[in-house]
Image (tube, rainbow, N blue to C red):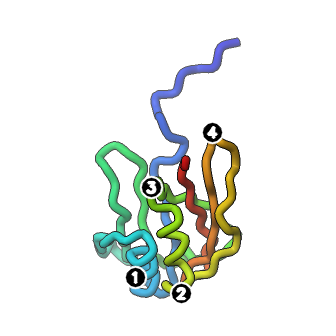
Amino acid sequence: MTEPSHPNKNAINWFEIPASDFDRAVKFYNTIMNINMQVFPMGPAQMAFFPMESGSVGGAVVKQPGHEPGPHGPLVYLNVTGQFDQVLGRVENAGGKVVSPKRLVTEEIGYVASFIDTEGNQVAIHAPK
């Protein structure tokens, strides 16, 4: 039996990282990723968007009623290709805690690590090299 073809290239097309202290969370991700997130109010929610190219996977830090942070929710892997060590090295100075240091999964998959952010979420990073 042949698998049906699927028009989407990625299993994930959007992610949201919940925040209880929105400004603190945005500062944390701006610091560790060395970016400047765009902040937008969206009704009762506050959202800060990670940079992305058109048509690629995107995501945001979100403060929204009923969407609370915690370490046992979905595990999001942020792409840090070319800057793995720099991003991981900024986590603790920015107020987070590394919980799983850099490790090689396989030569084909690359490296991963995870941390707890300033809001209590566990987030991971990935790079192929």
Q: Which residue is mark 3?
A: 82
Q: Are marks 1 and 4 in contact (CB under 8 Å)?
A: no
Is residue 74 at all visible to an observer of this figure?
A: no
Q: Tell me the distance, in whole angstroms, between the alpha carbons under discs 3 and 1.
A: 22 Å
User: Label 3's element?
Assistant: loop
Q: Which residue is mark 2?
A: 95
Q: Are marks 3 and 1 in contact (CB under 8 Å)?
A: no
User: Residue drawn at (54%, 70%), measured in percent from left and top?
Assistant: 88
Which amino acid, mark 2? Gly
Q: Tell me the distance, in whole angstroms, between the alpha carbons under discs 3 and 2.
A: 23 Å
Q: Tell me the distance, in whole angstroms, between the alpha carbons under discs 1 and 4.
A: 33 Å
Q: Earlier in the sequence, mark 4 or mark 3?
A: 3
Q: Tell me the distance, in whole angstroms, between the alpha carbons under discs 2 and 4.
A: 32 Å
Q: Are marks 2 and 4 in contact (CB under 8 Å)?
A: no
User: Label 2's element?
Assistant: loop
Q: Tell me the distance, in whole angstroms, between the alpha carbons under discs 2 and 1.
A: 10 Å
Residue 16 vs 63, above or below: the answer is: above
User: Residue drawn at (39%, 86%), measured in percent from left and top?
Assistant: 23
Please state which of the two labelled residues, at mark 2 or mark 4, is closer to the viewer. Answer: 4
Q: Earlier in the sequence, mark 2 or mark 4?
A: 2
> Where is residue 94 shown, x and y percent of the image?
49, 84
> Where is residue 8 shown, x and y percent of the image?
47, 34
